[in-house]
Image (cartoon, rainbow, N blue to C red):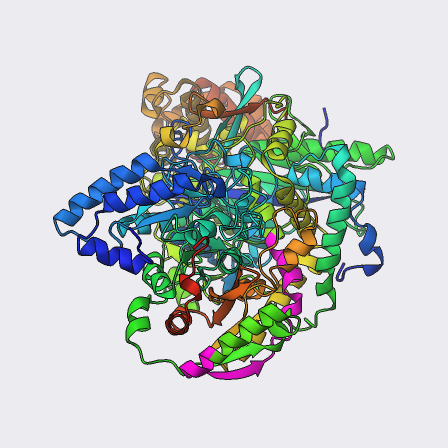
């Protein structure tokens, strides 16, 4: 059984070429056979098969939902009722969530079958999936290389074809960067497009739930199902959700004006540069007009991000205190030691570093110079984008400066790790939607092309990606093929 | 204190500062890790210190990327609390209370 | 024991922070019930418990109640206000931060006029902001452990911060009572101090008049008007002693112990804390329009100042009496209930309530709402006095007895045969008898010793067991003494 995409699977299920149970069994088999990738923290085999059975019953009564029978992997940052939700951390190793995240709920309602919870950098802090309590995830293209992070497990699973799609979250690039390093599509919607309720918070004003798929059309289908206003999330938007799939297939739009920021292409190495400009040529052939633009303050993105995100996370992670759930240390003679020991035992090094930096940035005497200043820089960066979008429809650049790096290569150099986010963080700071799609290879390892849109313009990003993928076949390449 | 004091950028995260921060954030760092931590944190501060030179005069801080206002919820009480499910980790509770080492006030 | 003794060289500076629980059905940021007294943690939802991934959504009614309060104290209402996180660790604070307001509170720049011992004074209200309440920790339930109940966590509060404008315990208590009356009149809080829905922190310092503010101590969580007065008096004495012996007052948080009637330092959960306030990224700015405000203004119930005006106009009360009666909701309710049973002698009723009923309440350390003599009974007494059925002195005695023994006023009057003797003939007979008995005193009175009238009155009173109507008696005696 080889279905290349979500749309193929949905079609096959609708036509009754395959049952939900059969396809679920197939993916479970593949997952178990690829255990060494370490993509999954929890495999929900029994419940997946039970659910598949129920869905098959519904299908036999012609009661079909938009995604009936579609297996999916959920990043272990989404709360799943009755199922362990660890967020990649020892702190939540024993946590069984009493409720479902809205994203999980919506996907369940739409008929998907959850295969399991995927591995991730601890509390979404990382760009390589090496900070997970459950061990590093491997890049299926070369097991010595990182898949990227923090949604490494979700990306690797889709790239390895052991799950047809998966969910992820993106705070500074945690969907797009792993998508780029793993040669698949990774979509981060506009901030507020998708509900954050039930998504364990890292940096509340930057976090957004998103998707991994093998092609853009799949992302369009799934995006519609997870988007929309959620009254349980005050920051979720009421902007109408279009039919993205319909727009991709049926709209005539192709003459996009695409801007390439000088700042995104100045320091590229030759391989990445060549791949990138070949892609630009393809877009021109499709009918796009290419313009050079400037995003003057992009260079400050990583610095501003590394103030805002740690500051918000230092507060968001205070609830993990060992009192009501999660890891509680045995060394608790006093309240103070209960707090300190539970948290110090439960959190890894990177998380602790970010909490300390964040605490510093918010502390008395430093708040103005760090947090407040970073929020102003954020405004500068957002202004750059809004000025650019007056001249262009979409913005283009490579997703990452280079291909994947080796496991262990950057673990002792947090700064080097942070700088690999240089092309992705600005979009989070400005709340913009962006997608990474495969654009080629360097030394056998995938490279990614990033398309950024204006607020709530996901449909144009998806349309352009869809058109690009009609002219290229990077996205159908599979590791080990 | 309005701007980052670049003269001291190399040595901000000394033992005392780390001690204060770990107190506020309820973490404990073993002595043996302090040196490495201090170095890493100072490097991070150097990186983020780059925002100091940013031309932000007259700019407002951006707390949210989108310009929306807070939606309001009707004052309706929902009786949907399942204490047992919430307290399924019984190692932390007694008779429905959460328990911690005795606090002296 | 410190007591407030002669502060001639020191000026007391008091500011109050009042936490008022709002009477909403659901919590500030979650839909859990706010009922008091439920079994532990049965009103703590996943949001109140700060489960991973949960998010706050703001209660509309709580915002409206805050606006109502702002209008009642002549304050400005922010057109955009921001929620901020106050970060600190304590088991009754599940998120490790409290959602409160820091810069840009919903209400600011208000004021309240109070009347203390005949003098009017304006107390500034710096701000009133919305915030969520913490849960409860109980330290004596389990051995070696503290028990945490999060039912209360997330209940909406407004914190009302006054300017440090008060200069005595009496001013502080008057202000406190007026705020209490306002929030109850508005219906935004039940103001139940025992249940903790109205709590007061007092900031107290001393200074030499004209100098800068001194170091202040904060007394936290005082939950009765009486305790507030006592705590302030104790604290002022304590600080006076320290300063007069050349020491310096510590800036610290203290607790008031009502059993020992003293304040002591608190081993504070918020000690040495840097709260690292920053705008809560899970909540957006709260927008309040002029239209909303004017709609709320139209529907405001009667406030103390309006009540005072109404008492003056409707009941013909004196300004000061109207001020005092209207400034306490319990007192005004007591008065109005009684007044509906009294035909016209409202000022008499007011006097009687203000001197006797309030006096007894104070003596027995009771709030007037707990007075054992009902307003209907008081109304009866006042009616009898105005009908000259009994004298004021007798009314006071009946009241005292009714208060002590919880017996009906009518029963006491009947059983003690207290009825005033107003019958002219009867009184004339008694008066004549007395005058005949004391011819020397009569002569002295006629020669100018006017004071002897009191003696004659007293003698008749003795003969009549105090039941003679004093007014009538005076008239009769005057007539008899002049006439002869």
Of residues C301 and A305, which is closer to you in this image? A305
Residue C68 shows up from this direction: yes
Residue drawn at point x = 60 percent, y = 57 percent = C103
Give the residue at x 38% y 74%: A467
Residue C105, given in percent of the width and then of the height, sits at 55, 56
Residue located farthest toward the front when viewing the structure as drawn: A481
Nearer-the-camera pick, A104 or C134: A104
Task: Identify whether C356 is placed above or below A119.
Answer: above
Q: Main secondary structure of the magenta part?
A: helix
Residue C372 position within the rendered picture, expressed as x and y whole percent measured from the top left: 40, 26
Left or right placement of residue C427 versus residue A339 in this view = left
Q: Please give the count of numbered marks on the rendered protein.
A: 0
Is residue C291 toward the left or the right of residue C224 in the image? left
| Residue A74 or residue A411, whichever sits in front | A411
Residue B65 can be seen, yes or no:
no
Quarter where residue B81 is shown: top left
* Residue A47 occupies quadrant: top left
- Single out the residue that lies furthest toward the top: C143
Q: Which residue is drawn at 66% across and 52% down?
A: A362
Please identify the quadrant where the C terminus of chain A is shown: bottom left
Q: Give the range drawn in magenta.
A: A282-309
Query: Is residue C43 part of the magenta span, yes or no?
Result: no
At 43% from the left and 82% from the top, the residue drawn is A285
Q: Is residue A289 magenta?
A: yes
Residue farthest to the left?
A61
Residue A464, image x, y percentages: 41, 74
């Amino acid at each position: 059984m080889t279905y290349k995409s979500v749309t193929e699977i949905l079609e096959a299920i609708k036509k009754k070429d395959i049952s939900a149970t059969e396809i679920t069994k197939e993916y479970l088999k593949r997952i178990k056979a690829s255990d060494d990738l370490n993509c999954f923290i929890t495999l929900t085999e029994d419940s997946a098969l039970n659910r598949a059975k129920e869905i098959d019953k519904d299908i036999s009564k012609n009661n079909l939902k938009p995604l009936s029978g579609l297996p999916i992997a959920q990043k272990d940052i989404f709360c799943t009722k009755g199922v362990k939700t660890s967020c990649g951390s020892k702190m939540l190793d024993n946590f069984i969530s009493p409720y479902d995240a809205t994203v999980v709920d919506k996907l369940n309602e739409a008929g998907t079958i959850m295969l399991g919870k995927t591995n991730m950098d601890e509390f979404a802090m990382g760009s390589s999936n090496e900070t997970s309590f459950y061990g590093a995830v491997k890049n299926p293209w070369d097991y010595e290389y990182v898949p990227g992070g923090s949604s490494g497990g979700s990306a690797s699973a889709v790239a390895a074809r052991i799950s047809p799609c998966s969910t992820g979250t993106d705070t500074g690039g945690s969907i797009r960067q792993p998508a780029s390093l793993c040669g698949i599509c990774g979509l981060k919607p506009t901030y507020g497009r998708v509900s954050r309720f039930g998504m364990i918070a890292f940096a509340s004003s930057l976090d957004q739930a998103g998707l991994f798929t093998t092609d853009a059309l799949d992302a369009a289908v799934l995006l519609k199902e997870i988007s929309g206003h959620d009254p349980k999330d005050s920051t979720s938007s009421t902007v109408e959700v279009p039919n993205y799939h319909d727009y991709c297939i049926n709209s005539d739009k192709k003459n996009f004006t695409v801007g390439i920021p000088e700042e995104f292409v100045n320091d590229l190495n030759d391989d990445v540069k060549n791949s990138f400009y070949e892609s630009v040529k393809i877009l021109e052939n499709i009918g796009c007009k290419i313009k050079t633009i400037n995003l003057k303050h992009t260079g400050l993105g990583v610095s501003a991000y590394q103030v805002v995100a740690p500051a918000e996370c230092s507060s968001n992670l205070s609830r993990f205190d060992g009192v009501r759930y999660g890891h509680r240390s045995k060394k608790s003679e006093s309240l103070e030691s209960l707090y300190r020991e539970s948290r110090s035992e439960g959190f890894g090094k990177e998380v602790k570093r970010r909490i300390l930096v964040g605490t510093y940035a918010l502390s008395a005497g430093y708040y103005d110079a760090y947090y407040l200043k970073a929020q102003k820089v954020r405004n500068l960066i957002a202004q750059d984008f809004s000025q650019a979008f007056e001249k262009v429809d979409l913005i283009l650049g490579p997703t990452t400066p280079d291909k994947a790096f080796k496991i262990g290569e950057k673990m002792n150099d947090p700064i080097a790790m942070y700088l690999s986010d240089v092309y992705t963080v600005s979009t989070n700071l400005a709340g913009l939607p962006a997608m990474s799609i495969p654009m080629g290879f360097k030394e056998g390892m995938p490279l990614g092309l990033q398309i950024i849109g204006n607020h709530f313009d996901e449909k144009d990003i998806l349309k352009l990606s869809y058109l690009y993928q009609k002219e290229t076949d990077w996205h159908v390449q599979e590791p080990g093929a | 204190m309005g701007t980052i004091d670049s003269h001291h950028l190399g040595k901000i995260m000394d033992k005392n500062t780390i001690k204060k921060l770990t107190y506020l954030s309820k973490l404990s760092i073993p002595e043996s890790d302090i040196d490495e931590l201090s170095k890493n944190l100072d490097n991070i501060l150097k990186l983020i210190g780059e925002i100091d030179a940013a031309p932000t005069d007259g700019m407002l801080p951006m707390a949210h990327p989108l310009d929306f206002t807070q939606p309001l919820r009707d004052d309706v009480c929902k009786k949907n609390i399942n204490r047992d499910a919430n307290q399924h980790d019984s190692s932390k509770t007694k008779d429905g209370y959460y328990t911690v080492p005795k606090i002296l006030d | 024991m410190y007591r407030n003794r002669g502060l001639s060289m020191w000026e007391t500076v008091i500011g109050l922070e009042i936490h008022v629980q709002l009477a909403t059905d659901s919590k500030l940021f979650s839909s859990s019930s706010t009922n008091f007294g439920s079994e532990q943690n049965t009103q703590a939802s996943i949001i109140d418990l700060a489960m991973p991934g949960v998010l706050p959504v703001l209660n509309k009614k709580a915002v409206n109640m805050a606006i109502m309060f702002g209008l009642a104290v002549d304050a400005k209402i922010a057109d955009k206000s921001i929620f901020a996180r106050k970060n600190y660790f304590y088991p009754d604070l599940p998120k490790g931060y409290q959602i409160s307001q820091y810069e840009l509170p919903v209400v600011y720049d208000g004021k309240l006029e109070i009347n203390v011992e005949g003098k009017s004074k304006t107390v500034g209200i710096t701000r009133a902001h919305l915030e969520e309440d913490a849960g409860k920790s109980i330290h004596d339930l389990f051995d070696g452990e503290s028990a945490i109940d999060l039912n209360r966590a997330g209940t909406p509060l407004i914190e009302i911060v006054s300017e440090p404008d008060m200069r005595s315990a009496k001013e502080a208590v008057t202000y406190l009572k007026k705020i209490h009356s306002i929030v109850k009149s508005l219906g935004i809080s039940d103001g139940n101090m025992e249940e903790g829905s109205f709590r007061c922190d007092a900031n107290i310092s001393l200074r030499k008049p004209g100098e800068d503010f001194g170091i202040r101590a904060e007394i936290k969580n005082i939950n009765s008007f009486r305790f507030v007065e006592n705590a302030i008096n104790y604290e002022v004495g304590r600080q006076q002693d320290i300063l007069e012996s050349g020491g310096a007052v510590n800036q610290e948080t203290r607790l008031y112990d009502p059993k020992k009637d003293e304040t002591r330092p608190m081993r504070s959960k918020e000690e040495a804390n840097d709260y690292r306030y920053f705008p809560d990224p899970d909540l957006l700015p709260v927008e309040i329009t002029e239209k909303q405000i004017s709609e709320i203004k139209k529907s405001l119930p009667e406030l103390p100042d309006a009540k005072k005006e109404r008492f003056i106009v409707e009941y013909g009360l004196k300004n000061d009496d109207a001020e005092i009666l209207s400034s306490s909701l319990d007192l005004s309710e007591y008065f109005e209930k009684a007044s509906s049973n009294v035909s016209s002698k409202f000022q008499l009723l007011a006097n009687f309530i203000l001197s006797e009923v309030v006096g007894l309440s104070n003596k027995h350390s009771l709030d007037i709402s707990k007075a054992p003599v009902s307003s209907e009974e008081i109304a009866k007494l006042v009616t009898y006095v105005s009908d000259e059925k009994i004298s004021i002195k007798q009314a006071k005695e009946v009241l005292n007895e009714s208060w002590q023994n919880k017996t009906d006023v009518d029963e006491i009057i009947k059983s003690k045969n207290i009825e005033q003797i107003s019958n002219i003939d009867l009184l004339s007979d008694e008066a004549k008898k007395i005058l005949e008995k004391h011819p020397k005193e009569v002569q002295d009175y006629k020669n100018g010793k006017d004071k002897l009238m009191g003696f004659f009155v007293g003698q008749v009173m003795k003969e009549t067991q105090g039941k003679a109507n004093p007014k009538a008696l005076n008239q009769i005696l005057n007539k008899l003494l002049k006439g002869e």
